[in-house]
Image (cartoon, helix red, strand yellow):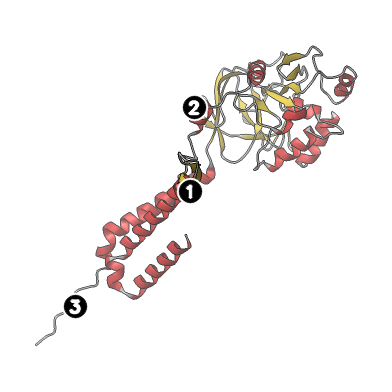
Amino acid sequence: VGLVLLAAGAALLAALRHAAFRARWLVWVLLVLATVDMLAVDRRITHPERSLKQVARDANGTPVLVDSPRMLEPGARHLENTRPDADMLELAALLGHERAWPLGRDAGTNDGMIAGVRSLGGYHPAKLEAYEKIRNRLYDPAQPAGRIANWLAGSYLTFDRRLPDALFPRLQELGVDLDRTPIFAGSRVFYRNRSALPRARLVSAWAPVAGGLDDFLDGMQAGREPAGGRVLLDAAPDPMPVAASAPLPEVAYLADGMNGITLRVAPLSSAILVLADMWMPGWTVTVDDKPARLLRADHVLRAVALAAGEHTVNFAYGDPALKQGLTVAAAGFLLILSLLVFGAGFARPPPREGRST
């Protein structure tokens, strides 16, 4: 990359000093440099194995260097060759669209991801700062944040072995009402959390967000924040929710993927749809295929205001950095193309006037 930048700088310097070079060669030099840069990306990033070797043995057992096999594969192909644990498949069937709250050995692993398990635990090297604060409370060894797990739809608690009966009253103090009948699956034990909220839910009361996330989480775990009874929003909803005289209807899932969730809901009066998934830049929402305002709920979740009636709501993610990169790349390509097509004519020096005799 450094050599490409040096060459580009030298070409621009030459173009400033020599009109003929600017008119005839500058665009071609820039095109060559862009091609060289893309080839380097292809070799080092898209196909890193092309610059690597691995040690193998020939028929006589002598170590030899051979070409490295393909290192990167499409994600779908990789998943096809990976078999999830049978107990994780059972957990995924129990959860549906809700989440597990894994304790014990599964707290820091992603073993259930292949089976489609949505987990409050797991590991990722690039965690959202807000969720790391939540995770630290969920896995506080002295006082696991059960009410926060309820708020985030932790509908099943998983553990390595059966929980002792003496632990259930302590969990109730932390806000977790477990069904004491365990579900045994391989080397894991599952307990249904009867106090967990649905991941997608309707709410008819709201308040403006105040304070910071830490204060909110402390209030949630202490039982001062009525999770499920109301939602804190970063802006006033439109339309305003109307207090419901009857229980609000459940939300149905039409699609539930990593980059998009489609829901169907039919409130009898205007309400707020809360999806207990993390808010971050790049998420948008449509209601009945029309753009709507995405609200930030409870500091970190996603929500949208709905009028009475049946609606199809779609949350979709588009990486803003990718969009910006593609926009800049397209603009650069068009600039080079325009220079190639029109630059020679603009940069051609005017004809010299003939000398009078």
Answer left or right for 104 relative to 36. right
Label 2 neighbour load within 10 Å: few <14, some 14-19, many 20+: few
Quarter location, residue 257: top right
Q: Position of residue 179 (x, y in %)?
A: 79, 14
Q: Residue at x 48, y 46 (%)?
A: 64
Q: Is residue 321 left or right of residue 135?
A: left
Image check: 346 left or right of 80? left
Q: Is residue 356 something one can see in this rendering?
A: yes
Tag 2 and tag 3, C-beta contact below 8 Å: no
User: Which numbered tag is attached to residue 52?
Assistant: 1
Q: Which mark is residue 289?
A: 2
Mark toward the viewer: 2 or 3: 3
Between 49 and 138, which is closer to the camera in this rendering? 49
Earlier sequence position, callout 1 versus callout 2: 1
- The alpha-carbon separation of the residues under discs 2 and 3 comes to 63 Å
Disc 2 is placed on an element classified as: loop
Amino acid at circle 1: Leu
Q: Residues within 10 Å of mark 3 (few under 14, many from 20)?
A: few
Quadrant where the C terminus sits is bottom left
What amino acid is at disc 3? Arg
Q: Amino acid at mark 2?
A: Asp
Location of mark 3 (residue): 352
In the displayed image of the protein, which residue is found farthest to the bottom? 357
In 3D space, how far apart are the residues under numbered discs 3 and 1 (Cα atoms)? 57 Å
Instruction: Please name which of the two marks, 1 or 2, marks the residue nearer to the observer.
Output: 1
Judged from this view, the residue extending furthest toward the left is: 357
Q: Quadrant of residue 11?
A: bottom left
Q: Where in the figure is residue 106, as x and y percent of width and height?
A: 72, 29
Q: Position of residue 87 (x, y in %)?
A: 67, 18
Q: Earlier in the sequence, mark 3 or mark 1?
A: 1
Q: Nearer the viewer, residue 334 or 133?
A: 133
Residue 119 sits above or below residue 6 on the image:
above
